[in-house]
Image (cartoon, coloured by chain):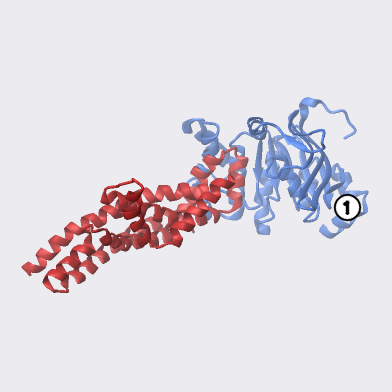
Chain colours: A red, B blue
Amino acid sequence: MEKLMGTVLLMLDGTQITLQIFCVTLAMALPLGLLAALARISKLRPLSLLMELYIWIMRGTPLMLQLLFVYFALPMIGIRLPDIAAALLAFTLNYAAYFAEIFRAGIQSIPRGQYEAAKTLGMSYSQTMRRIIIPQMIRHVLPPISNETINLVKDTSLIYILAMNDLLRVARTIVQREFDMTPFVVAGVFYLAMTFVLTWIFKKLEAHYAKYDK
Amino acid sequence: MQNMINDEDMMLRMHQIHKRFGSLEVLKGIDMEVRRGEVLAVIGPSGSGKSTMLRCLNRLETIDQGSIEIKGEFLAVQNEQGYSEYASAAKCRELLSCMGMVFQQFNLFPHMTVLQNLLEAPVQVKKRSRDEVLPEAEELLRKVGLFDKRDAYPSRLSGGQQQRVAIARALAMQPDIMLFDEPTSALDPELTGEVLKTMRELAAEHMTMVVVTHEMAFAREAAQRVIFMADGSIVEEGEPVEFFQHPKEERTQAFLQNML
């Protein structure tokens, strides 16, 4: 029992890194994803094409490769980032691309009549987006955003290749040292706990946004 | 048309409007005028271009040729090459701000309550204070008989109620001209009456109105003038009594026979 407590305490430290990556990535990737979505549907063709390219690269290559690239390749061209910053950069760029596509689909699902009503009331493009389109879009995209967010919790385990002591790496270290599989089970329970909390939060959000529906 | 019209009373004027969607010409030289306080009903078969004509008036569609005047100022004017040029963005915004529009599908903002729907544009666009607009908005809701629904979301309302809110929302911007694009076409028959009643009351207050409609009774009783469109052209126009009792053109006669 005492041994288990020790394991749990060690792994709580690892959870801190995991949560840090998760929270900062989410806080940066959501707004960036929204901006990218707006750029993607922009009438400025070069901007829209640039975003298409960015999204294609980020979704078309493994996140693992992107992490390795930021961590090992960037220093070769003189960009040396602290470990945690490198991981955050890769995660944010990757997740912003996924969020951008979700937001884009959400924005495009709003009927044209909403834009026309806003226009005939004299609202500008930015007013229309801010006040009419995006608030409605958020409700539509909550389920897919919830999905991606849960993926992010699990994807944070990829940083173990960057020798950062996140939850999974701590578990593996203990397993290798003591040849006891319990830490893997504990790690699984930790991930489940985090996704459970997220699922609960998104359920509340969906209920909140459903209030204007039937 | 033949009468001399005081220019100050001229609210809208379209001159030789042409509009194409690709190779399809949907408006083939429309001339139209609307005077202050006039209620103009536009009727015609579907696909005749009447909704497109209405949408050109407030620039939901852009015209290819011809000119549009709003209260004596050009929204669009035909240049020497024969194509329409619109006024500057700021000028367009200013001219279009005197027009309100009511849509077939209501297009209320579903994430806002009835009251918020009314307050949104006056507060966001005209930058008026909420406290100042609130009594006006409440008065408008009383007028359309929906004061008790002010805190409801649109999805809780019937189609007829939603359309009355949409009318009140447009009126909250204090327009001089109201455009109606088939306002009762999406409604169950028993709900059209309440919307038409609201529109009749508006007409009685001398609001300038252009109404694209299939409601012949409304055109006959509430309009001062009726335009019949077919195939992108105006076939016939006149005062309702004369128009409905003695239509001159064959196409008008055939259309009216089908409708009545």
Which residue shows up at 26% across the image and 55% down it? A19
**Camera-nearest residue between A202 and A207:** A202
Image coordinates of residue B27 in percent, x first then y, are 80, 47
**In the shown orientation, is residue A173 left or right of residue B58?**
left
The single residue placed furthest to the left in the displayed view is A2
Quarter assignment of residue B6: top right
Residue positioned 57% across, 39% down in the render: A123
- Residue B129 placement, left or right of A175: right
Q: Which amino acid, mark 1?
A: Thr
Q: In this view, does A137 lie above or below B131?
A: below
Where residue A16 sits, quadrant-wise, is bottom left
Q: Where is residue B14 in the image (x, y as percent from the top left)?
A: 79, 37
Give residue A187's position: percent from left, percent from top: 21, 67
Q: On the rendered structure, is A174 left or right of A126?
A: left
The mark tally for this picture is 1
> Counting other residues with Cα less than 10 Å from the Cα at mark 1, is it few (<14), some (14-19), or many (20 or more)?
many
Look at mark 1 in the image and give the residue it sits on. Answer: B252
Which of A42 and B110 lies nearest the eye of the viewer?
Answer: A42
- Residue B201 image-quadrant placement: top right
Residue in view at x 68 percent, y 46 percent = B197
In-front residue for pair B169/B188: B169
